[in-house]
Image: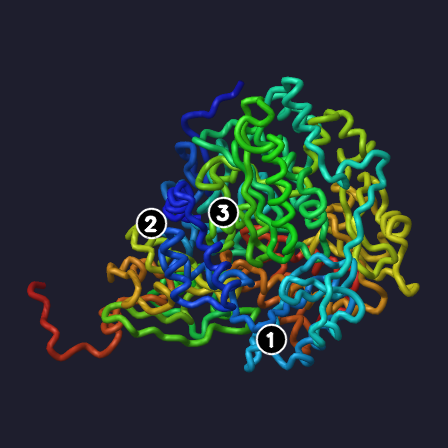
Amino acid sequence: MSKNLVELIRRHHEQDAPTALEVLKEAIDAHGTITDDDRREASRRSGLPEATVYGVSTFYDDLLQPRGERHVRVCTGTACFAATGDAHVDALRDGFGVALGERREDGVVSLAETVCLGFCHSAPAVRDGDVIDAGPGVVTRVLEDRARAADEPAPASLLEEPVLTLPGDWSGLRATLASGTTPEQLLEAVKEADVRGRGGAGFPAGQKWGFARSAQGERKFIVANGDEGDPGSYIDKGLMERSPALLLEGMALAGYAVGADHGFVLCRSEYPLSKPALEQAAAQARAEGLLGADVLGSGFSFDVSIVEGAGSYVVGEETALLACLQGLRGTVSARPPFPAQSGVHGMPTVVNNVETLCNIPFIAREGAEAYRALSPGATPGSKLVCFNDRFVHPGTYEVPFGMTVRELCEDVAGGLIEGRAIKALQIGGPLGGILPASQLDTVFDFAQLAVVGCMVGHGGIVAFDDTTNMRDVARHLLHFGASESCGKCFPCRIGMRRGYEAFAADAPVDRANLEALLETLELGSLCAHGGGMPAPIRSLIAHFPDELGLA
Amino acid sequence: MSTTPTTFTATIDGSTGEFAPGTTILEAARVLQATIPTLCFDERQDPFGACRVCLVGVQGAPGPLPACTTPLRDGMVVDTREPTARRVAGAVVELVLSELPEPPAEHTELAAVAREFDVTSSRWPGKQHEPRPEPRHPYLTLRHELCISCGRCVRACDEVQGTFALTAIGRGFEANIVAGLDEGFKASACVSCGACADTCPTGAITELSLLLLDGPEPAHRPEPATR
């Protein structure tokens, strides 16, 4: 990330200037397109150079096209693909008579792809304006201009005392401040609890906090990564919209431990309800003295800002997230420096996933030992998992680590609908390996899943039933990979495109060339997007070689 | 308690030297005269880590590491010819050639790197960048189709010149660069300093005077004054 631009942004932020991305989002929301005058205005108000603003305006999905009077976004996430094989996309395109990414000539409607709306429990999903409709009949309703907001199942917990499916009551922060627990003691408790990051990488949260705490900086920041871009996952969506106070409390506790006085939540624009829910919870917390200056008379000050993204999967990577948060193009930066040394405005910053932070209030209230006891003999704590609409009981569930994948799929989610059999599962997002039905007895935990080339990841579990063509799965995943590549590192920028082209062509895929391409992506890429995409493709090669059309 | 040593010892391709903490593998390699090819690196700019052509083998590391952005650790042993690192870096060069509608001109850095890896074609042919010449400036010309998104011109304009007339645009395979609001150098904040053309490794941005040198020699060209 350009040091000069970040310094410009810091100085303008001190003057309450909006970011360039915020101004551009306002423009397209106001008049459906972005003109050069809008860009000049964004440059003037944000303080960023015009060229930089231009670059931002060409990066994010939300800013890319002129919108019709109705802007319809069709979900092309993995759960929607698993439900229809993309038939819903074709039906909308044909029904509206407009190509994806275009505005119809009469200006009435524009159609865009979006990945993913987080309605995997009722696929396929379509967003018409800010209304998200999903499930059977959705295409007809949207074509007839009578979309209705789809229901979302309430999360459930398998634990005796739920940890993550509660709305949040600030009792962890109250207990910490009332008992005189020092920041060092809280940091030690989080380290002892061994909280592993729930966003994909599984990095120990306490260690990250420790780096940021000992880093030098005028100010420090906490950033909640709410850019849950993994198709098939709607876990953080549920937390941000149903338990926003729990997240804000976790951020405040992180701020207390690290010595930060401000936090940012970056939530996805694909979840239009998240930002309002978080802002409402923050306003209520301020009114109750739980956020702001001198929290509960303790002398500790902490407040939050809620920022919305603009459509980009790679922004879930922490350096790209920081770029987006500051209104820049959401591209990845090489580390070091790590965010703990140089993050928001160049200051030491903790970036934790939403679910990770939601674990903290329990630890602050009950202690590390109680937390570790939640999953005896496995990864400490509990995990939220969610299932796609192929299951009988799709939804979000809080589970202990250590159950088998079969128990999760059959006992918790009730097996598949229509008596279908599981052909394979993708666990943890698009960069997670694919587990064939023959390996359902694998234990759901970091180490055991890694043995079979899979990961806990975000915790989304997408079932492909026995009607799924696995070459289509490979093409679907590589299409996602190529269109979401941020374009920074060469292996991902070009290689992902080449992988997609190989599977999109009506021709056999040369296996040796494919393996070499996967090696180049895996070992050469700058971040986990290019580095991780080979995992599911390798699983498909290993378990379904005959279906892939390899030569 | 251990303290950070004031100097690090590192060995690259069998040569050992002492370096200050914070030195990257690439910086150390250049001191020790080990050759590591690069495309997105320019020593006048902060390392960027995009091209991955500088991958090297590091003893004990699980996979190849980019030399330009990896700081040395004390006792690090680096092998710039490690087979996996070279194989992956060479494959990246193949990918780069596959996106260009024509081979890089002989005098460019990209052509030199391709020679270094002995890459002349690609196992992964596919979509190439569409020709889009931009001749709206008296001294600078931009051929978008030769851009490999290494970011050197954008960083030269930011870090060296402080003009911010250039930006990366798009994402994924469609990434490229433009001046100002995609209005060409002349209408943008460009001050015609030529830092972008100077650093461009593919000839996507060139100074027109250099282009003319490729053409027939002007009849009135003066003879050199002395020999």
Q: Which mark is residue A109?
A: 1
Mark 3 lies on residue = A334
Q: Mark 1 belongs to which amino acid?
A: Val
| Residue at the (58%, 27%) spot, across then down | A295
Mark 2 lies on residue = B159
* Chain that bears disc 1: A
Q: Is residue A349 left or right of residue A376?
A: left
Q: Position of residue B15 (x, y in %)?
A: 43, 38
Q: Is residue A466 left or right of residue A107?
A: right
Q: CA distance from mark 3 to mark 2?
A: 17 Å
Q: CA distance from mark 1 to mark 3?
A: 40 Å
Mark 1: secondary structure: strand
Up-down relation of residue A97 to residue A540 (above or below): below
Q: Position of residue B147 (x, y in %)?
A: 41, 66
Question: Which of label 1 and label 3 is nearer to you?
Answer: 1
Q: Nearer the viewer, residue B49 or A154?
A: A154
Mark 3: secondary structure: loop
Visible in this render: residue B6? yes
Q: Are marks 1 and 2 on the same chain?
A: no
Q: Residues within 10 Å of mark 2 (few under 14, many from 20)?
A: some
CB under 8 Å between callouts 1 and 2?
no
Q: Nearer the viewer, residue A419 or A91?
A: A91
Q: CA distance from mark 1 to mark 2?
A: 43 Å
Up-down relation of residue A531 to residue A255 (above or below): below
| First in residue order: circle 1 vs circle 3 | 1
Quadrant containing the C terminus of chain A in the rendered view: bottom right
Question: Which of label 1 and label 2 is nearer to you?
Answer: 1
Up-down relation of residue A319 to residue A96 (above or below): above
Query: Going by the picture, which residue comes out furthest to the left?
Result: B225
Q: Is residue B42 left or right of residue A348?
A: left
Q: Mark 3 belongs to which amino acid?
A: Ala
| Residue at the (45%, 25%) spot, across then down | B5
